[in-house]
Image (cartoon, rainbow, N blue to C red):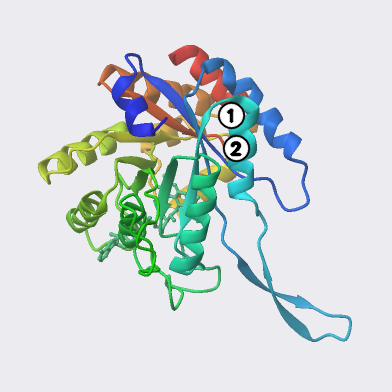
Amino acid sequence: MKIIDILNSKTRPFPSFELVPPLKGSDINKLYKSIEPLMEFKPPFLNITYHRDEVEFRQKGDGTFEKVTVNKRPGSVAIAAAIMKRFQVEVVPHLICGGASKYKLENDLIDLNFLDIQNVVALRGDAIPGQKYFSPEPDGHKYSCQLVEQIHNMNRGKYLDETLTDAIATNFCIGVAGYPEKHYEAPNPEMDIAHLKKKVEAGADYIVTQMFFDNQRFFRFVEKCREAGITVPIIPGLKPISTQTHIELLPRAFSIDLPEELMKEVRKCKNNEAIYQAGIEWCTMQSKELLAQGASAIHYYTMGKADNIRKILTAVF
Ligand code: FAD
């Protein structure tokens, strides 16, 4: 079932979760174990992130360095299919433009279609570590709206190979990313929202947001999107902080603010256990307020942790 149909048909709010593929060489059973405790909350869908190749310089025995290309978390498409089969749940693999030509993306979409996966989130991806700016592949996309357009074309039977005159039309539901605190490259929130509108005009069915810790930012973002004429559903994305490291890492990694009220709570904490608890309480408070204000779904960034999310969901859903 398409996510947009789930969003339109559910009469009660529901949670969904974002999963990260296991590191190369790890057992997929670990991932299954992290999903199992969340399934009692009946998420209608699970998202699976995509991780692009990275370039590393590895020192050889003779002291020289060799350049190697590695993908630390391969297998997104296969993992999505395996999770769908095992848990009988809709899956939403993420697709990114970074590191991929449009031809590779088309082949990935064909694979997904064969696997009966009807949902994707279309993203640009970030610059590779060590590079300052995102640079597209020679045959790739510069912005996610171009990937959305490509998928939308396939949904109308229009593939890249124009000699394919009677190709089957795919039936993908397309999600895209939105940034309540603005994407870090956008010159201002208004332009970021104008770019978001382009993704919707290109064929996106719904928006799922970057994590945020201040609900007011989300409410203002939704208001501005509506004023700009974006009418598709906007799913808020939440993540509970759980360690001191998050306080330093999350603002840097995701270009987001941690509100002073939350920081006051964290400063009272004597150890990571107390921070973990404060994170649960903050995320529970955010979730309850979002639902009270009419959110029909909340997307949780689990990052492989189920225990804190379970506690939040028990209090909220
Ligand atoms: P875009 O929509 O292309 O936007 C990128 C920047 O360009 C923005 O500043 C925007 O304002 C601007 N822009 C957009 N369109 C135009 C245009 N037409 N003209 C001029 N400027 C434009 N990364 C991964 O690698 N793997 C994942 O699985 C993953 N999942 C994510 C899930 C969610 C919900 C979110 C919020 C992010 C995720 N990311 C993931 C991170 C994402 O790839 C980065 O945030 C990336 O920097 C931007 O991706 P985007 O799709 O929003 O890019």
Image height check: is 296 above or below 128? above
Which quadrant of the view contains residue 188?
bottom left
Q: Which mark is residue 49?
A: none
- Image location (x, y in percent) of residue 143: 34, 64
- Image location (x, y in percent) of residue 287: 39, 23
Kindly identify which residue carries mark 2.
243
Kindly identify which residue carries mark 1.
276
Q: Residues within 10 Å of mark 1 (few under 14, many from 20)?
A: some
Identify residue type, mark 2: Thr
The residue shown at (79%, 86%) is 64
The residue shown at (74%, 35%) is 30
Identify residue type, mark 1: Tyr
Disc 1 to disc 2: CB gap under 8 Å? yes
Label 1: which secondary element: helix
Residue nearest the observer in this picture, 30 or 222: 30
Image height check: is 128 above or below 253? below
**Mark 1 or mark 2: whose residue is earlier in sequence:** 2
Residue nearest the observer in this picture, 169 or 239: 169
Q: Quadrant of the C terminus?
A: top left
Residue 48 visible somewhere in the drawing:
yes
Label 2: which secondary element: loop
Residue nearest the observer in this picture, 196 or 110: 110
